[in-house]
Image (cartoon, rainbow, N blue to C red):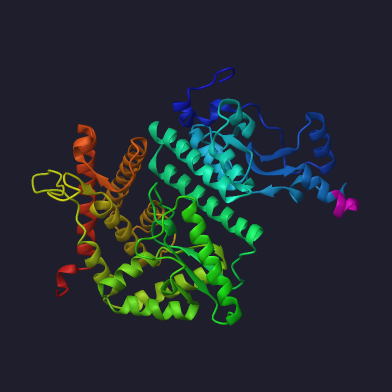
Amino acid sequence: MPGSIPHEDSFYFIRAGTLCSRTPVTCPPETSVVELARLMQRHNITGVIVVDRELPQGVVTLRDLRNLVATAPESLLQRSVADIMHPGLITIREQDYLFKAIFTMAKHRIHRLVVTDDSGTITGLLTNTDLLRIQTRCPLYLSQEIETCESFEQLRGIGGRMTEMLQYAISTGADPHSLISLIAHFNDELTMRVIALLDLLEGVRLPEGAAFLALGSDGRGEQTLRTDQDSALVYVDDLPPERMPQMERFASRLVASLEYLGVPRCPGNTMATNPQWRHSLSEWKVLLNGWISTPLPDNMVNFGMFQDMRVIHGDCALQQELREHVIAVSHQTALFFPYMARNIVRFKPPLGMFGQIKTDSEGEHKGTFDLKKGGIFTLTLGVSLLALEQGIMGGNTWEKIERLRQQGKLAASDLDAAEDAFSFLLNLRLRRQFAAMKEGRKPDNRIDPLQLSKREREQLKQAFKGVNQIIQLLKGHFQLDLIRT
C-alpha cells in the first residue's frame, strides 16, 4: 500500500502482506561466512534470512558474525552460515491480520517479521518501521514504553493509553482471543515492570526459592477490563526464616502498587498479602489434598481459583511441582471430578423455557443478569475440569479446548459449542465494559438485554445454548445423576 495511510479504525485489519516494505535478502545454509559478510556489506543490512528450497530455515545477524570473529577467527574460512544461524525463525502469513503481527512482535520482543505465503515461501519482510509509517501508537511501542518507565506515576499514565488502544481494536471487530491475549500480555508487562521498579527504587525483591503466582482468570491469561487481583505465594520448604519478612514485604508492596495502577484488590482477599494464600510447597500440597479430598463448597471454590495458577515471577520449578501434585492427587480421589462437576453445573445460563433471557426481577440490578455467573464461569471451570481429567493444566480456555480436541476423547461438537459460546460471551463482556467506561460508569459483568441489538440477543441465546450443552456434557461424562445429594 505505497503512499496510503489507512483510517485508524481499520488499522488492525490490514493484511500483513500489503505492508511489506521490501523483499528480504536471503542465502542458502551452505553459504560461507565470508560470502555472507560480503552480502551484508553489499546490501548495507544487519541480517540475512537463511532459506533452503525457498523455505525459511533461520536467520544470521551482524552480531553472530561479530561473535564468531571474536571467539574463533581462525575458523572463518571453514565456517558456513548453517554453523552460526539461529533456527526457528518467527514468521507470519501474508493473509494474517496486522493485529497478529503487532502482537507477535510485542510478545517476542522483535522488530521484524518474515512474511510467507500459505506454502511457507518467503514473500516479504514486515518491520516496525512499516508499522510506524502508518500507526505510531501500537502495542509494540506501548510495550517498549512500559519497559522504560522509571516511576510508578509513569506506569499509571500508560494504563489509559492501553485502554484506548484496545478500544480501537474491539470497535473494528478484532477477534476476542487476540484481544484477551493482548490484555494478558500488557498486564504481565505492567506487573513485571512494577516488580523491577520495586527492586530498583525501594530494594524490595522476592527472595530466591519463592514464586509469585497469578490465580483465576489472571492465571489463565483471560483478564478483561475489570479484573481483581488474585494471587498467591509459594516458597521452598527450607526457605531461611529470616527471608520471610522479605517475602511478606514483597507481597505487600506489589499488591499496593498494582492497586495504585488501577488493578483492584480482590474483595475476597485472595491475594499474596493474605497469609492463607502464602505457604511453603509442602503446606500447599497439604492444603490441596484437603480441598481435593473433601468436597465442601469453600474447598471447591478455593481449588477452582488455584487450579489455573501460573508463575508471574520467581521459581518456575515450584509451579511444575504443584501442577504435578494436583494431577496426581485429583486422579487418586474417586469422587473429586464428579463433585467438582456438580458444583459447576449449578451455575446455569439465564435462559427461560421458551428461549427468553431472564433478568433479575428486583433490587439494584433489576433488568440485568450477571454474564460471568450466567455463562463464563461455567465454561472456564467446566473446560478446566475436563482438561484436568486428561492431565492438562495451564493455558487459557481456548488452548485447553484445542488440546482436548487434539486428544479426541470428547465430541468435537461439544468442544466447538464451548469455544463459540466462550468467544462470544467474552467479546460481549469486553464491549459492554468499554461502553460503560465511555459513559463514565464503572465496568462490571452486568448485561441489560434491552441494550443489545436484535442480532446480539439472538447470538447471546445461541451462546447460552452452548453453555447448556457443556452442562449436559459434564452431567453425562461424570455421571452426576448417580451422585446422592
Farthest left residue in view:
354
Tell me: 388 left or right of 476.
Answer: right
Q: Where's the N terminus, which quadrant?
A: top right
- Residue 201: image quadrant is bottom right
Q: Which secondary structure dominates the residues rendered in magenta?
A: helix
Q: Is residue 393 magenta?
A: no
Farthest top residue in view:
3
- Total numbered circles: 0
Q: Residue at x 42, y 36 (%)?
A: 167
Find the magenta span and give its range. Answer: 69-75
Q: Where's the C terminus, which quadrant?
A: bottom left
Residue 474 percent location from the top left of the image: 24, 62
Q: Is residue 434 placed above or below 287 in the rendered structure? A: above
Residue 173 is at least partly visible in this image: no
For this rendering, which residue is in front, 2 or 129?
129
Q: Residue at x 51, y 35 (%)?
A: 118
Residue 101 percent location from the top left of the image: 54, 37
Residue 54 percent location from the top left of the image: 64, 36
Residue 126 percent location from the top left of the image: 61, 33
- Residue 172: image quadrant is top left
Tell me: 294 left or right of 150.
Answer: left
Q: Is residue 319 placed above or below 67 in the rendered structure? A: below
Q: Is residue 423 placed above or below 291 in the rendered structure? A: above
Q: Is residue 470 placed above or below 17 in the rendered structure? A: below
Q: Is residue 72 magenta?
A: yes
Residue 410 is at least partly visible in this image: yes
Q: Residue at x 21, y 41 (%)?
A: 448
